[in-house]
Image (cartoon, rainbow, N blue to C red):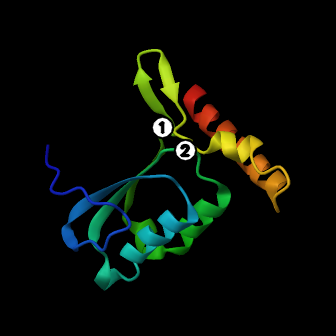
Protein backbone atom coordinates (compact mmCIF):
# COMPACT_ATOMS: atom_id res chain seq x y z
CA UNK A 1 0.00 0.00 0.00
CA UNK A 2 1.27 3.45 -0.84
CA UNK A 3 3.97 2.21 -3.23
CA UNK A 4 4.16 4.49 -6.25
CA UNK A 5 6.73 2.77 -8.42
CA UNK A 6 9.38 0.02 -8.29
CA UNK A 7 12.49 0.53 -10.41
CA UNK A 8 15.87 -1.16 -10.77
CA UNK A 9 18.78 0.70 -9.21
CA UNK A 10 20.72 0.53 -12.49
CA UNK A 11 18.22 2.69 -14.38
CA UNK A 12 18.00 6.46 -14.31
CA UNK A 13 15.04 7.26 -12.11
CA UNK A 14 12.76 10.28 -12.01
CA UNK A 15 12.98 12.44 -8.89
CA UNK A 16 10.13 12.29 -6.39
CA UNK A 17 11.29 14.90 -3.85
CA UNK A 18 8.10 14.60 -1.80
CA UNK A 19 8.26 10.81 -1.45
CA UNK A 20 10.42 8.45 0.57
CA UNK A 21 12.47 5.73 -1.13
CA UNK A 22 12.93 2.12 -0.11
CA UNK A 23 16.11 0.47 -1.38
CA UNK A 24 16.43 -3.32 -1.06
CA UNK A 25 19.95 -3.99 -2.27
CA UNK A 26 23.06 -6.09 -2.04
CA UNK A 27 25.55 -3.79 -0.25
CA UNK A 28 28.18 -3.60 -2.99
CA UNK A 29 30.36 -0.59 -3.77
CA UNK A 30 28.51 -0.16 -7.09
CA UNK A 31 25.03 -0.11 -5.52
CA UNK A 32 26.09 2.28 -2.75
CA UNK A 33 27.69 4.56 -5.33
CA UNK A 34 24.39 4.61 -7.22
CA UNK A 35 22.46 5.55 -4.08
CA UNK A 36 24.97 8.28 -3.22
CA UNK A 37 24.48 9.64 -6.75
CA UNK A 38 20.75 9.88 -5.99
CA UNK A 39 21.66 12.26 -3.15
CA UNK A 40 24.61 14.10 -4.69
CA UNK A 41 23.43 17.48 -3.40
CA UNK A 42 20.59 18.84 -1.30
CA UNK A 43 18.85 20.52 -4.22
CA UNK A 44 19.15 17.45 -6.46
CA UNK A 45 18.16 14.68 -4.03
CA UNK A 46 15.69 12.31 -5.71
CA UNK A 47 13.70 11.56 -2.54
CA UNK A 48 12.78 13.19 0.76
CA UNK A 49 13.90 10.25 2.93
CA UNK A 50 15.54 6.84 2.58
CA UNK A 51 14.96 3.36 3.98
CA UNK A 52 17.96 1.08 3.25
CA UNK A 53 17.54 -2.68 3.49
CA UNK A 54 20.66 -4.74 2.79
CA UNK A 55 20.15 -8.37 1.75
CA UNK A 56 23.52 -9.30 3.30
CA UNK A 57 26.04 -7.93 5.78
CA UNK A 58 27.33 -4.46 4.99
CA UNK A 59 31.05 -4.21 5.61
CA UNK A 60 32.88 -1.29 7.20
CA UNK A 61 33.96 0.10 3.82
CA UNK A 62 30.32 0.22 2.66
CA UNK A 63 29.23 2.06 5.80
CA UNK A 64 32.18 4.45 5.45
CA UNK A 65 31.08 5.24 1.90
CA UNK A 66 27.57 5.98 3.12
CA UNK A 67 28.94 8.26 5.88
CA UNK A 68 30.76 10.34 3.26
CA UNK A 69 27.48 11.19 1.51
CA UNK A 70 26.18 13.84 3.91
CA UNK A 71 22.85 14.50 2.13
CA UNK A 72 22.09 10.76 2.18
CA UNK A 73 23.00 10.40 5.87
CA UNK A 74 20.65 13.25 6.78
CA UNK A 75 17.77 11.52 5.02
CA UNK A 76 18.24 7.93 6.24
CA UNK A 77 15.26 6.82 8.33
CA UNK A 78 15.98 3.07 8.28
CA UNK A 79 19.18 1.08 7.78
CA UNK A 80 18.78 -2.67 8.29
CA UNK A 81 20.51 -5.90 7.28
CA UNK A 82 17.67 -8.31 6.48
CA UNK A 83 19.84 -11.31 5.51
CA UNK A 84 18.11 -12.54 2.37
CA UNK A 85 21.09 -13.55 0.26
CA UNK A 86 19.44 -16.86 -0.68
CA UNK A 87 16.25 -18.11 -2.33
CA UNK A 88 13.60 -20.03 -0.39
CA UNK A 89 12.43 -22.58 -2.97
CA UNK A 90 10.12 -24.53 -0.65
CA UNK A 91 9.32 -24.64 3.04
CA UNK A 92 12.49 -26.56 3.96
CA UNK A 93 14.58 -25.94 0.84
CA UNK A 94 16.87 -23.08 -0.08
CA UNK A 95 19.04 -22.17 -3.05
CA UNK A 96 22.11 -19.91 -3.05
CA UNK A 97 21.47 -18.76 -6.64
CA UNK A 98 25.06 -19.36 -7.74
CA UNK A 99 24.73 -21.27 -11.03
CA UNK A 100 28.41 -20.88 -11.88
CA UNK A 101 29.74 -22.09 -8.52
CA UNK A 102 30.84 -25.57 -9.71
CA UNK A 103 32.86 -24.07 -12.55
CA UNK A 104 34.36 -21.49 -10.19
CA UNK A 105 35.27 -24.17 -7.65
CA UNK A 106 36.45 -27.05 -9.88
CA UNK A 107 36.91 -25.78 -13.43
CA UNK A 108 39.96 -24.21 -15.06
CA UNK A 109 42.47 -25.55 -12.55
CA UNK A 110 45.39 -24.38 -14.67
CA UNK A 111 43.95 -20.99 -15.56
CA UNK A 112 45.42 -17.71 -14.41
CA UNK A 113 43.91 -16.65 -11.06
CA UNK A 114 42.13 -20.02 -10.69
CA UNK A 115 43.03 -20.26 -7.01
CA UNK A 116 41.85 -16.71 -6.22
CA UNK A 117 38.57 -17.34 -8.11
CA UNK A 118 38.09 -20.53 -6.09
CA UNK A 119 38.72 -18.70 -2.82
CA UNK A 120 36.33 -15.89 -3.80
CA UNK A 121 33.65 -18.46 -4.63
CA UNK A 122 34.13 -20.11 -1.23
CA UNK A 123 33.83 -16.71 0.46
CA UNK A 124 30.61 -15.99 -1.49
CA UNK A 125 29.12 -19.34 -0.43
CA UNK A 126 30.03 -18.75 3.22
CA UNK A 127 28.57 -15.23 3.13
CA UNK A 128 25.26 -16.54 1.76
CA UNK A 129 25.13 -19.40 4.25
CA UNK A 130 25.68 -16.98 7.11
CA UNK A 131 22.69 -14.89 5.98
CA UNK A 132 20.63 -18.09 5.86
CA UNK A 133 21.51 -18.98 9.46
CA UNK A 134 21.27 -15.43 10.89
Residue at 52%, 67% (x, y): give it.
30
In the image, is residue 94 above or below residue 79?
above
Left or right of 120, for residue 18: left
The x and y percentages for residue 115 are 84, 52
Residue position marked by numbered label 2 in the rendering: 56
Residue at 49%, 74% (x, y): give it.
69
Q: Nearer the viewer, residue 124 or 16?
A: 124
The quadrant of the picture occupied by the N terminus is: top left
Left or right of 38, for residue 119: right
Q: Nearer the viewer, residue 56 or 121?
A: 121
Q: Is residue 88 visible?
A: yes
The x and y percentages for residue 50 are 34, 60
Q: Are marks 1 and 2 in contact (CB under 8 Å)?
A: yes
Could you classify mark 1 by the number of other residues whose Cα lies within 10 Å: few (under 14), some (14-19), or many (20 or more)? many
Residue at 50%, 52% (x, y): give it.
26
The quadrant of the picture occupied by the C terminus is: top right
Q: Secondary structure at mark 2?
A: loop
Residue position marked by numbered label 1 in the rendering: 84
Q: CA distance from mark 1 to mark 2?
A: 6 Å
Q: Nearer the viewer, residue 120 or 65?
A: 120
In the image, is residue 42 above or below residue 114?
below
> Which label was assigned to residue 131?
none
The x and y percentages for residue 60 are 66, 58
Amino acid sequence: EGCSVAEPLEKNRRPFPDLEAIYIIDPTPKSIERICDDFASKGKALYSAVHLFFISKAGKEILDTIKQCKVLVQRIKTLVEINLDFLAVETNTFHLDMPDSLVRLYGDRGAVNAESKREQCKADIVKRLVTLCA
